[in-house]
Amino acid sequence: MEHATPLIAMIVAGLGLAFVLGALAARLRMSPIVGYLLAGIAVGPFTPGFVADQKLANELAEIGVILLMFGVGMHFSLRDLLSVRAIALPGAVVQIAVATALGVLLASTLGWGAGAGIIFGLSLSVASTVVLLRALEERALVTSERGRIAVGWLIVEDIAMVLALVLLPALAGWLGSDGSGPAPGAGDLAIAVLATLAKVAGFMALVLVVGRRTIPWLLHAVAPHRELFRLAVLAIALGVAFGSAKLFGVSFALGAFFAGMVLSESELSHRAAEETLPLREAFAVLFFVSVGMLFDPGVVLREPLALAGALFIVLVGKSIAAFLIVLLFRHPAGVGMTIAASLAQIGEFSFILAGLGVSLGLLPETGRDIVLATAIISIVLNPLAFGVSRRLEPHIEAAQRRFRGAPPARAAGPDPGGHVVVIGFGRVGTLVAAALAGKGVPFVVVENDADRVAELKEKGYAFVEGNSASRSVLEQAGIRRAAELLVAIPNAFEGGRAARHAKEANAGIRVVARAHTDAEVAHLERLGADVVIMGERQIALEMIAASGVTSRPGSS
């Protein structure tokens, strides 16, 4: 007897192909995301062979977005959000306005109406949550100043898109290209706007006031039971996201983000983040697969000029706008380059807006196909945008300093353009980090202890949470671009693996490690450490120097 199992078939085909093509992409030194998107195209309706269930794929992808935003919220407190409001709020609003205006202009050249142009422009203006956070995490930028600005910018964009999704049905008659629909009056429009704002404000107040008391209390109650704790974290993330969407009309992503942000104030936040990581990664892959399933490769041949115009708006137009906005707020050009690269793509909200436009009869189906194609191509090209940004950053910052009449910048670390990666934030690592911070040397700390991570967060140091023996963790810390690796942990086995991975990724990096025995010294040097400091030996030398033994008569 044959069973109808579309969900199982979707998961097996999606994850299986994503693994094969993602591994192939990584082998070719491309982002695995490219492989995930190709997997979606392969199981989509526009290519021969097996066709997965698109509706199921979208719902699985939504779970991925919820878990991802919940995790980000746990590393992004309300204080972080408010600290960047001065630039994130006006910056996101102006950038959305610029991109929407460019979209309206392109739509008019294609013969579409004003309503189609507005929806098309809005779809091109909002970046993908998943892609943005993946890019920041890979570069260890989530907790940095530029990372906080990018995430805050994205939250403002999400709120703006929630307002757009609520208001568009009410404005459909007025935006209709033929003008035949009933246009709402000014009073109706004002009521719709105020009602939407009241819903969003009510949701935020409920989560931040009530949730701040109940969510940490609930997790503390089940903390001794690992299975129940993990289940509680998932129930909170999914439950708050679903409830916020149904009761207040905000997006799943926004609801999950605020739930995670409330939980970030609890000492259990890092444990909760660790518990949700495997599911978050798996469902994020399914998100990219679902995006690939939407892509019709034929649109590239049918609408090449329109597609080129849309890509120009996403990759160039709104990126330049974001860069100039950051400069106007007198931030360094490097911050502007990172924000510009982060936003040079579109994703999940773009699909929702385009789909709504088609269902309202405002946007032609060709417009939706162009939006989807633009999303696929911009996501694929986003790593290239970061690469170009990184190469141009020192030149643009030098030009910015010359324009302001400032003297040329001096290298902050031992290698111009490099930073220091510090392994461990214990007794030794704390002193090392404080010294680096005092000298203005840029550094990133790698730590996996929850209490120490909380201390890093409190001090405002850049950090990556994880085990330093992992290649991926070191990659997040930017080991390929680092000047030095300081292994401040007493574990020679883990330190040795970190030293080896660092040398494999960056042959020019200088590795300094600590040891307790001669055998550990030999082990670390064999695995690539350039300098190994043995604690007992240094203590002995310091004691001899302090005692004045060498200065006594008869000593040599």
Image (cartoon, helix red, strand yellow):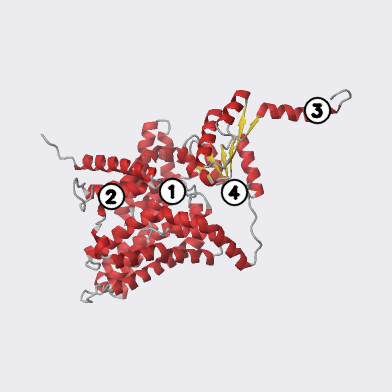
- Helix or strand or loop: what does disc 1 sit on? helix
Picture quarter with the C terminus: top right
How many neighbours does mark 1 have within 10 angstroms: few (below 14), some (14-19), or many (20 or more)?
A: many
Residue 73's label in the rendered image is 1
- Helix or strand or loop: what does disc 2 sit on? helix
Instruction: Name the outermost residue toward the right.
Output: 553
Decide which of tag 3 and tag 1 comes sooner along the chain.
1
Marks 3 and 2 close (CB-CB < 8 Å): no
Callout in the foreground (4, 1):
4
216 left or right, relative to 189: right
Decide which of tag 3 and tag 4 comes sooner along the chain.
4
Q: Residue at x 19, y 49 (%)?
A: 48
How many neighbours does mark 2 have within 10 angstroms: few (below 14), some (14-19), or many (20 or more)?
A: many
Percent position of residue 351, x then y: 29, 58
Q: Mark 2 highlights which residue?
A: 290
Decide which of tag 3 and tag 2 comes sooner along the chain.
2
Marks 3 and 1 close (CB-CB < 8 Å): no
Picture quarter with the N terminus: top left
- Helix or strand or loop: what does disc 3 sit on? helix
Q: Mark 4 highlights which residue?
A: 442
Q: Mark 3 highlights which residue?
A: 547
Decide which of tag 2 and tag 4 comes sooner along the chain.
2
Residue 173's label in the rendered image is none
Decide which of tag 4 and tag 1 comes sooner along the chain.
1
Look at label 2 and name its amino acid. Answer: Ser
Look at label 4 and name its amino acid. Answer: Pro
How many neighbours does mark 4 have within 10 angstroms: few (below 14), some (14-19), or many (20 or more)?
A: some
Look at label 3 and name its amino acid. Answer: Ser
**Which sits in the foreground, 222 or 540?**
540
For marks 2 and 4, give the CA distance.
39 Å
Res 434 seen here: yes
